[in-house]
Image: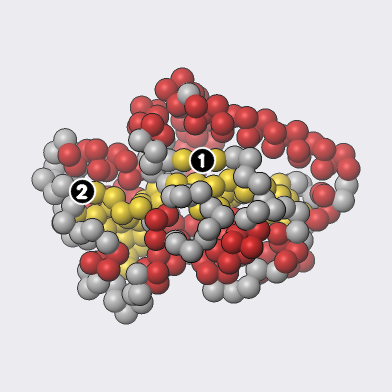
Amino acid sequence: MFRTGEADAFLGMTYIGAKKQLAAPDLGLRLVSINTWRGFFEVVPRDIRSFAELRGHKVIVSGPMGSGRNGGGDIIFQAAVRRANLDPGRDLEVAYMPAKAGIAQVAAGQAAGITIPSPGSTGMVMRSRMGSEGGSNIALSAIDMQAMFTGFRSFDEGQLPIGGLHTSEQVLQTPPRRSALLRVFDAYERACEALMREPERLAPMAIDQYGKHLAPIGATAPPAMLLARAIRANELVYRTGVPAAGIRADVSAFLNELLGASVEPGFLSAL
């Protein structure tokens, strides 16, 4: 759609955008702005306190609809495992499956962990404490993946440059398309800021739209109450308006670490 001019931008994980640009440099993808997140967790039995303690165990990487292999959760999981000085192919048994199936395996004690973002992680831990996670009595907790990526001094504590608005060089060089894109993005940022401020009021609207657009391709929307709870518990943070100039070097290093390849400067040139 970018090649044919049918699409002007996409919201997505920064490292997915960078991966696409590495694979198809002719697209001229550019990261226009950054949103920092806190939301990726490894849900584990409560007696497991770190990734290092997962050595020799079966762990699951999930996707909202499919297996999750090579998706956003998988890429950050693999990097987190390496941060724990483990080799994901040697030191762990990694299984890929849809979130619903993976949650059932953890609840049944058939796997020692599952990579799942909040509010899914928030819901799993909450239900386990109520004794209602798949009928299991296993008490669960969540390992914060964000805390594992130390050394990036320009990022706020517990947040990583995971989300971003991507466009193409062609759009940036076409004034009417660029102006329209920036108007949409301004409205999007204001909506995100409002959701962080007033989750109880706006979570139902967000979940309604999630279901409207993603249910047709198989995604299951979480309850609005759970989304609001995750935000209030600081387990789901989505920060907009991040000044790019001060974090560009750390963003480049973060993307390089996750992808195992150098991100070309052009990808970040629009920041």
Q: Residue at x 35, y 43 (%)?
A: 120
- Residue 63 percent coordinates (x, y): 41, 53
Q: Which mark is residue 140?
A: 2
- Residue 162 percent coordinates (x, y): 54, 52
Q: Which mark is residue 238?
A: 1
Q: Residue at x 14, y 38 (%)?
A: 131
Mark 2 residue type: Leu
What is the distance, in whole Å, between disc 1 and disc 2 at their CAs?
24 Å
- 16 relative to 92, above or below: above
Q: Is residue 238 left or right of residue 189?
A: left
Q: Residue at x 19, y 54 (%)?
A: 45
- Crowding near the residue tagged with mark 1, few <14, some 14–19, many ≥20 C-alpha atoms within 10 Å: many
Nearer the N terminus, badge 1 or badge 2?
2
Looking at the image, do the residues carrying marks 1 and 2 touch, with CB atoms under 8 Å apart?
no
Q: Which mark is residue 81?
A: none
Mark 1 or 2, which is nearer the eye? 1
Task: Pick the residue in front: 143 or 4.
Answer: 143
